[in-house]
Amino acid sequence: MELGIEGNTALVIASSSGLGWASAEALAREGVNVVINGRDEERLNEAVDRLGKVARGRVTGIPGDISKEEELRKLVNETVREFGRLDHLVTCAGGPPGKPFMETSDEEWYAAYDMLVMSVVRLVRMSAEHLRESRGNIVCITSVSVKESIENLVLSNSVRMGVIGLVKTLSRELGPDVRVNAVLPGAHETPRMEQLINKAVTRGDVSSYDEGLARWSGDVPLGRIGRPEELGEVVAFLCSRRASYLNGISLPIDGGSSRSNL
């Protein structure tokens, strides 16, 4: 399917690995010029090299901490300076610490809010006029935890809800010039997931990586967890002309594991 986005420019946040990287890869394969971002400059450079091997457009990396306003402004300004336009903003962030409510400090609440919500607020504020000019779009990668709370993830369960409210609000305030949507990933085999499973093996909770993977897959109707590229391809589709009437949606990508009716 021709997505009609070749030659566009995308800024993909927190994209040196994981679901952000998979989204950047899917866009790059479609001929989009992609700017990726991460805090670790060495890992970011490696990610740029990997993307360059599959990209049909140009790829560049800009290091930065998404919890810092001045570094977000640098990301947007350098993207527009480099490519002369901004068509797609894809927001992403790592998961906050997994803890129950009574063990979570005020500092952790504020840090999670800065990382998960204020990074999106600031990026949209800085990007809105560029996106209006290009009649572009925004895709926010959040989590299925906004639909069904996950045990011991009080920060993700609570704070990410703010992004969903923001997405719905922006879909009306920025329309018709800019479309705004969210994707809600369930378990995917990202480096973070691999790390969690390997820690479970080390603790003796499971005997092998395959057993750990099977446990994560146990409640998924499709019988497996997701591959990052499967989410990335949905993000690319939402950025495309083929999704031109999708606005203000929050789309679970979880293999059917959510039991929520809505």
Image (cartoon, rainbow, N blue to C red):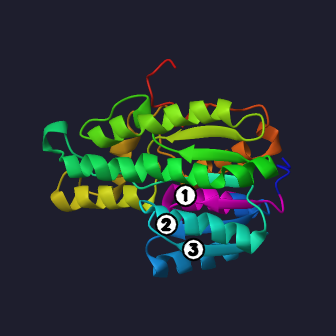
**Tag on residue 53?**
none
Residue carrying label 3: 62
At label 2, the amino acid type is: Glu
- Local crowd size for mark 2, using a 10 Å CA cut-off: few (<14), some (14–19), many (≥20): few
- Residue 202 lies, in percent from the top left, at 20, 62
The structure residue drawn at horizontal position 71% and vertical position 67%, both measured from the top left corner, is 80
Between discs 3 and 2, the one toward the N terminus: 3
Between discs 1 and 3, the one toward the N terminus: 1
Query: Could you tell whether 244 is left or right of 218 in the image?
Result: right
- Distance between mark 3 and mark 2 Cα atoms: 13 Å
Do we see residue 50 in this rendering? no
Cβ atoms under marks 3 and 2 closer than 8 Å: no
- Local crowd size for mark 3, using a 10 Å CA cut-off: few (<14), some (14–19), many (≥20): many
Could you say which is closer to the camera, residue 59 or residue 170?
170
- Local crowd size for mark 1, using a 10 Å CA cut-off: few (<14), some (14–19), many (≥20): many
Residues rendered magenta in the picture: 6-26
Asked whether 85 falls inside the magenta stretch, the response is: no
Q: Is residue 226 above or below residue 12?
A: above
- Residue 117 lies, in percent from the top left, at 44, 46
Could you say which is closer to the camera, residue 222 or residue 178?
178
- The mark closer to the camera, 2 or 1, is 2
Secondary structure beneath dot 1 equals helix
Query: Could you tell whether 80 is left or right of 70 in the image?
Result: right
Asked whether 11 falls inside the magenta stretch, the response is: yes
Residue carrying label 1: 20
Between discs 2 and 1, the one toward the N terminus: 1
Secondary structure beneath dot 2 equals helix
Cβ atoms under marks 2 and 1 closer than 8 Å: no
At label 1, the amino acid type is: Gly
Residue carrying label 2: 70
